Image (tube, rainbow, N blue to C red):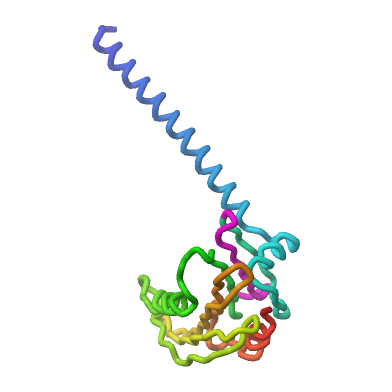
Amino acid sequence: MSRDTKIILAIVAGLLLVGICVCVVAVLMLRSAGEKIGEMVKTDPTQVAQVAAGIAQYDIPSGYSQMAMDFMGIYKAIIMAKKDTTDSPMIMMMSLPSSTGLNTEDMQKSMERSLQQRTGSGSIEWQVVEEKTVKIRGEDAQLAISEGASSTGERYRSLISVFSGVHGPAILMIMGSEQSWDQTMIDAFISSIR
């Protein structure tokens, strides 16, 4: 074997070794990131209650289960969905740090704009169909109810409100198909937020 061939083989072996090390580091980093994300999602009722306590107290609608996410103690979110079906409205509440400097009206408008923007094929173009004031945690809160249709013609509704949560601003979002929209359940849930 010539000297040039040995050098080329040594370079190739070195590059392969570096490539393997990079792959191992990438796998370890991805696994660590996956574990961190897994730590943020909570399904244990005690952990869910702890996260919820940082947003607001409420009564869980009948037949719904919930999970919580805690993003390093800065953002907290609760997601509720009816068991064994994807057709019923999904409820989400999220707290935001009071250091955002935004008031509830600015946040409400920002959420409405975000919801109304199209985000690719199959998305829903939303139209606000009703705005009203309700009491959430003893204070006036604005609700914006929107409707839209998917590219396949399915009709959907959403409700967005920003209210004063336990530790600062909080967002309430409810989304579901028009067919499964249960206004009585939604009104009872909103009334239960304390």
Where is residue 77, by image quadrant?
A: bottom right
Quadrant the N terminus occupies: top left
Q: Is residue 86 magenta?
A: yes
Q: In this view, does 177 lie to the left or right of 83?
A: left
Residue range in magenta is 72-87
Quadrant the C terminus occupies: bottom right
Residue at far top of view: 2
Q: Does the magenta stretch include residue 154?
A: no
Viewer-nearest residue: 113 or 42: 113
Residue at far right of view: 46
Viewer-nearest residue: 101 or 9: 101
Which residue is at a point 56% across and 88% down the rendered structure image? 179
Which residue is at a point 46% across and 87% down the rendered structure image? 147
Viewer-nearest residue: 16 or 52: 52
Which residue is at a point 46% across and 86% down the rendered structure image? 146
The total of numbered circles placed on residues is 0
Compared to residue 185, the image places residue 37 above or below, namely above
Q: Is residue 41 left or right of residue 126?
A: right
Coordinates of residue 105 in the picture (x, y in percent): 46, 80
Coordinates of residue 52 in the picture (x, y in percent): 67, 67
Compared to residue 73, the image places residue 147 above or below, namely below
Coordinates of residue 93 in the picture (x, y in percent): 59, 72
Compared to residue 168, the image places residue 174 above or below, namely below
Coordinates of residue 127 in the picture (x, y in percent): 41, 87
